[in-house]
Amino acid sequence: MGRATDRLRQVYRQARRVAKRLLRPPGRGPYLITGRARPSLEIHVPISPTPTFFNMVRCLALSLRRNGGAYRDAPVNVTAGDRVVDAKLAERLPWLKSCGVELRWANADDVVRDDYFATGHQRLRYEHTADVVLLLDADILIARPFEEMIESVFEQNVIAGLIAHVSPFEQAKRDDLDWHGLWRHSGLGRPRLDYEHTGWGYLSSDERHRYCPAYFNYGVVAMPRDFARCIADAIDPIFARVRGRVGTVYDAQIALAVAIAELGLPARALPMRYNFPNVPQLEALHAAEFPHASILHLLGEHQMTKSGLYGSMESMREFADAPHLRVTNFRAQRVIRDLLPLMETERQNAAA
């Protein structure tokens, strides 16, 4: 009986190895049950060329390679923005290549005109080759695979994102603005306010600002590549119009919402698991989503700050050892703790 059991185990393990080779071909996601290949993916991240931002990118890329499942090998393209382009910067950061990160630069004139918004817009203008384009902020960590999100965006042919936590007009304390007025200003008629803000009831209780159109938090937005091209062609005049009428730090997110409506793009709201923030009120409000959280967004300042976490290797080690972290911060701590040995190995290899 024992020998028969051992033989069955060997057959099972061999079958798993064969299945893995078939289901995970190099360069693409694994094949679906139907025999079709998963849609391919490329990732785009906007940054300022500072040490803190590059530490964020490094952690994002390594967390993708470690925890990204079928999309762990997806290319990561970083667009930096500054008034002066440092063409030699990538050569001084050898870990970019080892992490599969390509450094690109926004046009300096665009940066002068649009400030940091230029890097976000530049992401849309590239000649994308993957089936799905995933736009991420630098302060993102991948905690577990997210294949279902990418597959559904491709199969349903939609642009998808998490509905922003609160109204940009309420955040900016602009009582003179709302979606109806902005839509009229944009010549779009009456807006369809189909979505409730994901922080409603905890971060906001003003009924005037409860609902919105497809207004996404720009931390995680996924779309088919054709959508990116359509938005790229339209975004400059839309952004200029929004900036002239609104003028807040949320102008790029607002412009994307206007572009979606103006172009008639089908949109889908993502669940919090694909853009889970380290904000206690949202952790409580969306507690049912937390066990499934795949993508963590470290945008809050509860128990930590981004500059404090990503300022240096030493600050990342301190975060990894910090006591009493809770919920999203605790999950992020586990991710960072797993990445530190990888970064140390990269450092030793570069020094050798």
Image (spheres, rainbow, N blue to C red):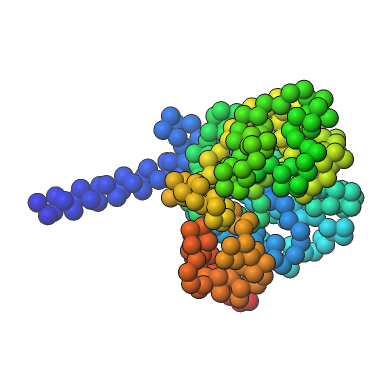
Residue 303 at x, y percent in the picture: 57, 66
191, above or below 303, in the image: above
| Residue 341 screen position, x and y as percent | 51, 70
- Residue 263's place in the image compared with 244, above or below, is above
Q: Quadrant of the C terminus?
A: bottom right
Residue 41 visible within the image: no
Taking the image as shown, residue 11 lies to the left or right of residue 137, namely left
Q: Nearer the viewer, residue 33 or 284?
A: 284
Taking depth in this image into account, of 164 and 342 the one nearest to the observer is 164
Q: Relative to 35, does residue 314 appear above or below in the rendering?
A: below
Residue at 31 percent across and 44 percent down: it is 15
Residue at 12% in and 54% down: 2
Foreground residue, 285 or 48?
Answer: 285
Q: Quadrant of residue 234?
A: top right
Q: Using the rendered image of the protein, determine whether residue 4 is visible from the camera's viewpoint.
A: yes
Horizontally, residue 120 falls left or right of residue 70, namely right
Task: Determine the residue positioned at 67% across, 32% down.
Answer: 213
- Placement of 190 over or under 118, stated as above or below: above
Farthest residue in the left direction? Answer: 1
Q: Residue at x 71, y 26 (%)?
A: 191
Question: Is residue 299 found left or right of 169 in the rendered image?
Answer: left
Q: Position of residue 68 (x, y in %)?
A: 51, 50
Q: Residue 80 appears at what percent x and percent y?
A: 77, 55
